[in-house]
Image (spheres, grey):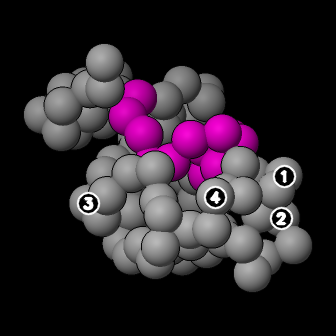
Amino acid sequence: MLASDDDILGQAEAWRRDGKGVAVATVVETWGSAPRPTGSHLVIDQDGHFLGSVSGGCVEGEVVTEALDVIADGKSRVLEFGVADETAWRVGLSCGGRIRVYVERVD
Protein backbone atom coordinates (compact mmCIF):
# COMPACT_ATOMS: atom_id res chain seq x y z
CA MET A 1 0.00 0.00 0.00
CA LEU A 2 1.33 3.42 -0.97
CA ALA A 3 1.61 6.20 1.58
CA SER A 4 -0.85 9.08 1.33
CA ASP A 5 0.25 12.61 0.42
CA ASP A 6 -0.42 13.61 4.05
CA ASP A 7 1.88 10.82 5.30
CA ILE A 8 4.60 11.73 2.79
CA LEU A 9 4.57 15.48 3.45
CA GLY A 10 4.15 14.90 7.18
CA GLN A 11 7.30 12.78 7.15
CA ALA A 12 9.19 15.55 5.34
CA GLU A 13 8.05 17.99 8.03
CA ALA A 14 9.11 15.61 10.82
CA TRP A 15 12.57 15.16 9.30
CA ARG A 16 12.98 18.95 9.03
CA ARG A 17 11.92 19.37 12.67
CA ASP A 18 14.64 16.85 13.55
CA GLY A 19 17.16 19.10 11.77
CA LYS A 20 17.67 16.85 8.78
CA GLY A 21 18.14 18.00 5.20
CA VAL A 22 15.13 17.02 3.09
CA ALA A 23 14.18 17.00 -0.58
CA VAL A 24 10.81 16.45 -2.25
CA ALA A 25 10.54 14.83 -5.68
CA THR A 26 7.29 15.39 -7.59
CA VAL A 27 6.10 13.88 -10.87
CA VAL A 28 5.37 16.97 -12.97
CA GLU A 29 4.68 15.38 -16.35
CA THR A 30 4.02 11.96 -17.86
CA TRP A 31 3.72 10.62 -21.40
CA GLY A 32 2.37 7.24 -22.44
CA SER A 33 2.40 4.45 -19.90
CA ALA A 34 3.72 5.76 -16.57
CA PRO A 35 3.66 3.90 -13.24
CA ARG A 36 2.62 6.93 -11.11
CA PRO A 37 0.42 9.91 -12.00
CA THR A 38 1.38 13.57 -12.12
CA GLY A 39 1.54 14.98 -8.59
CA SER A 40 2.98 11.85 -6.99
CA HIS A 41 5.63 12.58 -4.33
CA LEU A 42 8.74 11.00 -2.91
CA VAL A 43 10.47 12.60 0.10
CA ILE A 44 14.10 11.91 0.90
CA ASP A 45 16.20 12.81 3.93
CA GLN A 46 19.94 13.48 4.03
CA ASP A 47 20.58 9.90 5.17
CA GLY A 48 18.87 8.40 2.11
CA HIS A 49 15.65 7.39 3.87
CA PHE A 50 12.59 7.92 1.71
CA LEU A 51 8.83 7.62 1.66
CA GLY A 52 6.39 7.73 -1.25
CA SER A 53 6.79 6.87 -4.90
CA VAL A 54 7.37 8.64 -8.20
CA SER A 55 7.76 5.55 -10.34
CA GLY A 56 8.97 2.04 -9.88
CA GLY A 57 11.99 -0.03 -10.64
CA CYS A 58 15.31 1.71 -10.46
CA VAL A 59 13.93 5.20 -11.20
CA GLU A 60 13.46 5.81 -7.50
CA GLY A 61 17.06 4.86 -6.76
CA GLU A 62 18.20 7.40 -9.32
CA VAL A 63 15.85 10.05 -7.89
CA VAL A 64 17.13 9.40 -4.35
CA THR A 65 20.73 9.82 -5.55
CA GLU A 66 19.88 13.13 -7.27
CA ALA A 67 17.89 14.26 -4.21
CA LEU A 68 20.96 13.83 -2.00
CA ASP A 69 22.81 16.21 -4.34
CA VAL A 70 19.89 18.65 -4.18
CA ILE A 71 19.99 18.56 -0.37
CA ALA A 72 23.74 19.20 -0.45
CA ASP A 73 23.86 22.05 -2.99
CA GLY A 74 20.34 23.49 -2.80
CA LYS A 75 19.95 23.48 -6.59
CA SER A 76 16.62 22.09 -7.80
CA ARG A 77 16.68 19.69 -10.73
CA VAL A 78 14.28 18.39 -13.35
CA LEU A 79 14.92 14.73 -14.16
CA GLU A 80 13.49 12.94 -17.16
CA PHE A 81 13.29 9.19 -17.64
CA GLY A 82 11.88 7.36 -20.63
CA VAL A 83 12.32 5.03 -23.55
CA ALA A 84 14.00 7.72 -25.64
CA ASP A 85 16.66 7.91 -22.95
CA GLU A 86 19.52 5.41 -23.10
CA THR A 87 18.92 4.71 -19.40
CA ALA A 88 15.29 3.61 -19.90
CA TRP A 89 15.92 -0.10 -19.49
CA ARG A 90 18.34 0.46 -16.64
CA VAL A 91 15.87 2.56 -14.63
CA GLY A 92 12.84 0.38 -15.33
CA LEU A 93 10.81 2.34 -17.92
CA SER A 94 10.85 -0.20 -20.70
CA CYS A 95 7.01 -0.04 -20.90
CA GLY A 96 7.01 2.89 -23.32
CA GLY A 97 6.35 5.70 -20.87
CA ARG A 98 8.27 8.78 -19.91
CA ILE A 99 8.18 10.84 -16.75
CA ARG A 100 9.56 14.19 -15.67
CA VAL A 101 10.35 14.64 -11.97
CA TYR A 102 11.10 17.94 -10.20
CA VAL A 103 13.39 17.61 -7.17
CA GLU A 104 13.72 20.47 -4.69
CA ARG A 105 15.20 20.99 -1.25
CA VAL A 106 12.83 21.72 1.62
CA ASP A 107 14.12 24.67 3.63
Q: Nearer the viewer, mark 3 or mark 1?
A: 1
Q: Residue at horizontal 30%, vertical 64%? A: 38
Q: Nearer the viewer, mark 4 or mark 3?
A: 4
Q: Residue at x 39, y 51 (%)?
A: 36
Q: Amino acid at mark 4?
A: Cys
Dot 3 crowding, Cα within 10 Å, few <14, some 14–19, many 20+: few
What separation in Å lies between label 1 and label 4 (alpha carbons)? 12 Å
Q: Amino acid at mark 3?
A: Gly
- The residue that disc 2 covers is 87
Q: For numbered disc 1, what is the local secondary structure?
A: helix
Q: Which stretch did the figure color magenta?
A: 51-63
Residue 105 drawn at (x, y percent)? 43, 58
Q: Which residue is mark 3?
A: 39
Determine the CA span between mark 4 and mark 2: 13 Å
Name the secondary structure under disc 4.
loop
Q: Distance of mark 4 from mark 3, alpha carbons?
A: 20 Å
Residue carrying label 4: 95
Q: Position of 76 compared to 65: left or right?
A: left
Circle 4/circle 2 CB separation < 8 Å = no
Which image quarter: residue 73?
A: bottom right
Give x and y (percent) for residue 28.
Answer: 36, 72
Q: CA distance from mark 2 to mark 1?
A: 5 Å
10 magenta-colored: no
- Secondary structure under tag 3 reads loop
Cα separation, mark 3 vs mark 1, equals 24 Å
